[in-house]
Amino acid sequence: MAKTTLMAELEQLVSEARNPDTMQIDLMSSAEILAAMNAEDARVAAAVRAVLPNIAAAVDRIVEAFKGGGRLVYMGAGTSGRLGVLDASECPPTFGVPEGMVVGLIAGGDRALRHPIEGAEDSRDEGRRDLEKINLTAKDVVVGIAVSGRTPYVIGGLDYARSIGAVTAALSCNPDSAIARMADIAISPLVGPEALTGSTRLKSGTAQKLVLNMLTTASMIRIGKSYENLMVDLSVSNEKLAARATRILVEVTGRSAEEAEKFLAASQNNVKLAILMALTGMDAEEGEAALREADGFLRRAAAQHQPRAAS
């Protein structure tokens, strides 16, 4: 794309505009800079609140995909791509889901997580190829992430996803963006110009992080990954998580920490199963069957099986 054409495009983007409230930021003290940034950050939650219906629509489609054996796939470049990879990578330990159920793709590959890859975001074909590499299917949901809403890598990916029948969503911070127009669901929190012009890792990045948190967390809750507001499908993979698992068991069941650890051992550190065993008196095999019958929802399984008297 010719430089003059690209400059003209950027001039139309809210995310590239100059912020009238921070024109003197280079003359400010440290405290004044931070106060100005904080005032801008305060706008982010309201911008996300305004698009909650769109986020909910995306969550519903993601839940359908998960129940049908599909995946959630994030794709973006630069900060947007890194945020998608971050959110995807946190799902297995937080919700006990297999790696690959939520996928994060970044233009330029894993090296781009730490290093800028020149021109990586400029190829539509690369977006398509990255989705082909993970064998994208019509069962999947693809969320294209781009503050500008015009990143060629993301456009190429969304175009390919649509061509094979996958559900598509676009997360951008500009109104009526290119990716918003082509996706099934457009999520466009309008946070306004950045405190430092064009540095979209600031408010725009924060808005993206909030939305991505919502997409995965709400979807996981909807498929039974919580009990009340507790994470009961977490992966017990380190000492902190082991302590958290014990604490959750104590909180839900009223058992002692020592008893909780015994249930965890009997369930092979399956927190949800250990809780059900402690609540109902079932053994591991019975508990697994009860959870399957309840589609993985612990509250439902516990309600369907009365506690047994201690023998």
Image: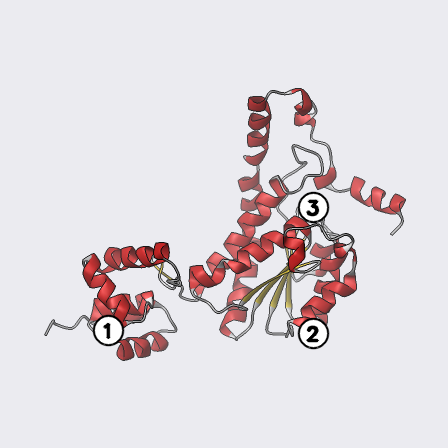
Q: Nearer the viewer, residue 261 or 182?
A: 261
Q: Are circles 2 and 3 on residues that touch, CB within 8 Å?
A: no
Q: Residue at x 58, y 57 (%)?
A: 85
Q: Is residue 163 visible?
A: yes
How far apart are the alpha carbons under marks 2 and 1?
43 Å
Q: Position of residue 252 (x, y in %)?
A: 25, 58
Q: Are circles 2 and 1 on residues that touch, CB within 8 Å?
A: no
How far apart are the alpha carbons under marks 2 and 3?
27 Å
Amino acid type assigned to the residue bearing label 1 in the image: His
Q: Quadrant of residue 36?
A: top right
Residue behind mark 3: 174
Please, is residue 52 above or below residue 263 in the view?
Answer: above
Q: Secondary structure at mark 1?
A: loop
Q: Which mark is residue 305?
A: 1
How far apart are the alpha carbons under marks 1 and 3?
51 Å
Q: Residue at x 65, y 32 (%)?
A: 195
Q: Secondary structure at mark 2?
A: loop
Is the C terminus in the top left, top right, bottom left or bottom right quadrant? bottom left
Q: Quadrant of residue 309?
A: bottom left
Q: Which mark is residue 164?
A: 2
Q: Position of residue 126 (x, y in %)?
A: 75, 64
Amino acid type assigned to the residue bearing label 3 in the image: Asn
Q: Residue at x 68, y 50 (%)?
A: 115
Q: Residues within 10 Å of mark 1 (few under 14, many from 20)?
A: some
